[in-house]
Amino acid sequence: SPGCAAAAAAAMSAGFESLNAASECAQKTEVAASELQKAATQEHEVDQPELFERLAKAANDAAAAASAAAGQTINAAMKAAEAAKQTKLVVDAASEAADAKKAEQAEGEENKAEEDKEDKEGSQEENEQPKEPKAPEMPPPEDSKPPSQEDRRARFESQRLNNRKLLARLNAEITNLQTNVKLLLNRNCLLIPEVSLEEKTQVLALVRDYMTSAKQHAAITFVGLTGDELRDAILRLPVFAPVCGPARVVAVSCCVSGRVLKLAALLDVEATVEVVTTEFFDQLRLRLKGADAGSHLDKTKDLVVEAIREIIQVPDEE
């Protein structure tokens, strides 16, 4: 359900924030331990007031980080409890619906048995007594009329609007999670998995194939385009749209080539920029002849290269 999905995403986001706070606490504690070790070795070499001030500052930083980590942990626990509550509501609703369906089926069977019995008794009475004229059937009340086309359309539009709001909220939650992961990996580089040269080469080979395919498509369909039309057409290509085109605001793109381009930038941004430049823009320049097309290709290339470099940038911590 929408409420359950949103609660789960919020719990996951709070979990990452708690993990970041715990990592910060570990770093502060490590600094405090280092200061204590230095104090033990430099007890007679440093002035006592200065030594006490350093130890007090390290202890205060560690305490503040521990307090922040505890707060984030409590927040994560509350979010998890809310997610569990939403899940329980979904399970209870499904259980109630199943029980109601079983009760409705049992009641229907009982009513059917009673109707069969009444029909049997009625048929016997009809055989014994003369038939009476039936009363005219009354038209159904106005409230029982099916909904009009306008009502169905309004309900459909309202449902689509609610779905759009839900998707926007979930997309914002996932984007926030991605930001937290970047911050966590930036603080703890040891958490970044090692990538072999073979794996990096395979990803760059995929990017080269996607660039070749995009270049062939652009060389056929972009002939005659200049200025903003050429720029917009290039940015709308499936391989560039998730990076610098209209789909860049989507947390997880459905375009495989765009996701591969982002992955290659994370592995080796300079090699990725070189592949995009040589395999797409330089080759497309040879196909689309003309000084005007060349100048607009240079501007578009600068936009794409800047967007690719932004992939590896870590957002500022608040």
Image (spheres, helix red, strand yellow):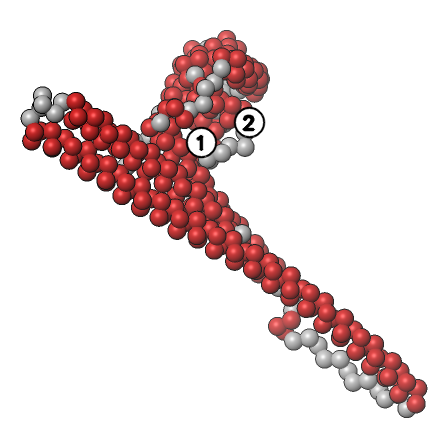
Callout in the foreground (2, 1): 2
The C terminus: image quadrant: top left
Q: Earlier in the sequence, mark 2 or mark 1?
A: 1
Q: Residue at x 13, y 22 (%)?
A: 42
In the image, residue 109 above or below residue 236: below
Quarter where residue 102 is shown: bottom right
Q: Residue at x 46, y 35 (%)?
A: 251
Q: Residue at x 9, y 21 (%)?
A: 45
Badge 2 element? helix
Quarter where residue 214 is shown: top right
Badge 1 element? helix
Q: Farthest residue in the bottom direction?
A: 129
Q: Which residue is mark 2?
A: 256
**Residue 64 screen position, x and y as percent:** 23, 40
Left or right of 188 in this view: 133: right
For the residue carrying disc 2, how many other residues have a C-alpha within 10 Å: few (<14), some (14-19), or many (20+)? few
Q: Which residue is mark 1?
A: 248
